[in-house]
Image (spheres, rainbow, N blue to C red):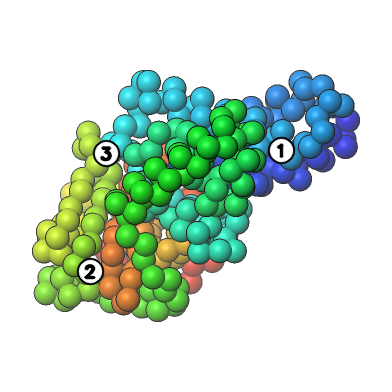
Amino acid sequence: MDSAAVDRFEASRGRLASLAYRLLGSAADAEDAVQDTFLRWQAADRDRIEVPEAWLTKVATNLCLDRLRSAQARHERAAGTWLPEPLLDGDPMLGPADTFEQRESVSLAVLTLLERLSPVERAVYVLREAFAYSHAEIAEILDITESASQQHAHRARIRAATDHRRTHETNLAAARRVVEEFLAAATSGRTERLVALLTDEVTAVSDGAGLAKRLLRYTTRERVATFVRAGFKPTPAKRRLAGGSLAMYIASVNGSPAVLAVVDGRVVGVVAFQVSDGRVASLHGIAVADRLTRLNNVWQRYEPGAPVISAW
């Protein structure tokens, strides 16, 4: 392959990776899909490809759909058993973030919701909401009719509206202050203050550090507060499981403030928050090690500042 062809692909790599991440919810799987796209590009008769960017998008999207369908067939990522991979803000795989729709499309809340859509619904939703493709372009990418694209988008939006109330855009600094106050209440045992910091329709989802077969889900302010209080209560058993004493940092993950639990420079757990009108609307807790691989690689080059809790 000549250098011009390689350069043409590399110019699209970042966009393809952010598309694949939104479709698959996994950075590792997204990287594999992009590499497979490169191999297809390498083997293609490139002289017959009129618009390389469109061709690459079509190939990458359909490779992701193949992965989603295969995973569904093997029941490896059924809704309720699997959380998306968190990424630190600044990671190029998070992709475009110019509009509210683009930023929301990569939040852990929305990525979790997308697991409930069919693969084609998910692809239409991502292409339309995050990348602003027209229905005519989406129809070409997915080999469906323009009418079918519109119908898939409509169904996806209805399901999204049913399962996810869009939170008001909140200044990240203000949201961080809410999380700091929430963390102080959680670690001090002030359950009443925790309840007051939660919205009426708050939800909490956790992977249980891989110790549970299904995701742990909690609703109602009281149940979420009890779950959080128990989760943030330090015990010798938790320290042994984590591999030592933890430091707690606040950083931005997938566009939202998050608490990161760190042991000897290694992130062992992430709790990401969505904040609405000064209160916590949702929490997503992820502590399965293989879901934190890319985040840890970025963390080694990150400058987080001082921890909010130096020894937990």
Question: Which residue type carries mark 1?
Answer: Ala
Measure the alpha-carbon separation of dots 2 and 3: 22 Å
| Mark earlier in primary sequence (1, 3) | 1
On screen, residue 43 versus residue 106, left or right, reads right
- Residue 242 picture location, percent across and down: 29, 49
What is the number of the mark on residue 98? none
Mark 1 surroundings: few (<14), some (14-19) or many (≥20) residues within 10 A: some
Q: Which residue is mark 3?
A: 80
The answer to whether 144 is drawn above or below residue 191 in the figure is: above
**Disc number for residue 54:** 1
Looking at the rendered structure, the kind of residue marked 2 is Thr
Q: How far, Cα to Cα, is label 1 from label 2?
A: 43 Å
Quadrant of the image containing the C terminus: bottom left
Label 3: how many residues lie within 10 Å, few (<14), some (14-19) or many (20+)?
some
Q: Which residue is mark 2?
A: 199
Quadrant into which the N terminus falls: top right
The residues tagged by marks 1 and 3 sit, at their Cα atoms, a distance apart of 34 Å
With 294 as the anchor, is 307 left or right in this view? left
